[in-house]
Image (cartoon, rainbow, N blue to C red):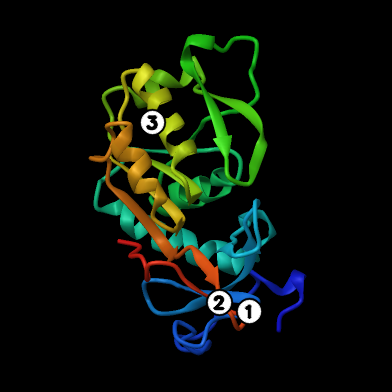
Amino acid sequence: MLAPHQFWQEIHAPGTFADGIAEGFADLYPATLPDGRQVALPIRVLPGGDDRAVASLIVNQASFAVEDALAGAMTEAARHYHPAVVVGVPTLGLPLAANVARRLGHPRMVALGTSRKFWYDEALSEPLRSITSPGGEKRIYVDPRMLPVLEGRPFVLVDDVVSTGASLVSVLRLLQRAGLRPAAAIFAMLQGERWRDALAEAGMGDVPIHGATATPLLTRGPDGRWRPQGGEVSAA
């Protein structure tokens, strides 16, 4: 059993953690990178009951080795789209976006913001909600000064986790307001598959989505252990 501060700190060899699909998991879920290596993620019970949970990833609490491993896999996904720019989503998507942009050889990345600067245009903003902050609504902005960096150039969107898809839809709508569309959205983790329905309902299901890792929604069994709800998901 890992202590709370030990999660997200190591990259483990392939097969380090026993496959828990049948026997279930107690306190951690092993997320698997494309090369088979694993990261131990804590299981967090979702609000509103004690029978559903997710594997949690908090990038700014992870070791640099874990961040680099995630960013490396994300960069390989990004390369397929030959992006000229990487756009980062606050807050936890920003360090990943910077890491990916550097690996692609870019001189900079473009950061979206949730703090309104006085020169921002309210018309270039959207309401933003997060599964990890259900009680508070923010707005997401694109700096008007950054539009010339993005217009007419292929770019990818980078964030840490996609779960319900609500935040992703808000970001895509924001970009749409500015006449922009990403070539792809790339995440450190795809958490469950609820985001697929959110994209489809918003008419944005054609945006390619990639993840360095993928984790399922989890349900608690009669034995108290956690098992995937509806099977595994693919990070591709």
| Number of dots carrying numbers | 3
Give how far across and how far down residue 75 sits, in percent: 38, 56
Question: Label 2, label 3: how many angstroms apart (C-alpha)?
Answer: 37 Å
Give how far across and how far down residue 164 sits, in percent: 47, 46
Give how far across and how far down residue 54 sits, in percent: 56, 62
Q: Nearer the viewer, residue 64 or 115?
A: 115
Of label 2 and label 3, which has the lower sequence position? 3
Of label 1 and label 3, which has the lower sequence position? 3
Crowding around mark 3 (Cα neighbors within 10 Å: few <14, some 14 to 19, many 20+) is many
**Can you see residue 64?**
yes
Residue bearing mark 1: 224
Q: Secondary structure at mark 3?
A: helix
Q: Are marks 1 and 2 in contact (CB under 8 Å)?
A: yes
Which of pointers 2 and 3 indicates the residue nearer the eye?
2
Establish if 4 lies above or below 17.
above
Which mark, residue 108?
A: none
Residue bearing mark 3: 172
**Can you see residue 182?**
no
Residue bearing mark 2: 221
Instruction: Report the side of 170 relative to 76 (left or right).
Output: right
Which of pointers 1 and 3 indicates the residue nearer the eye?
1
* Quadrant showing the N terminus: bottom right
Name the residue: 57% across, 80% down. 25
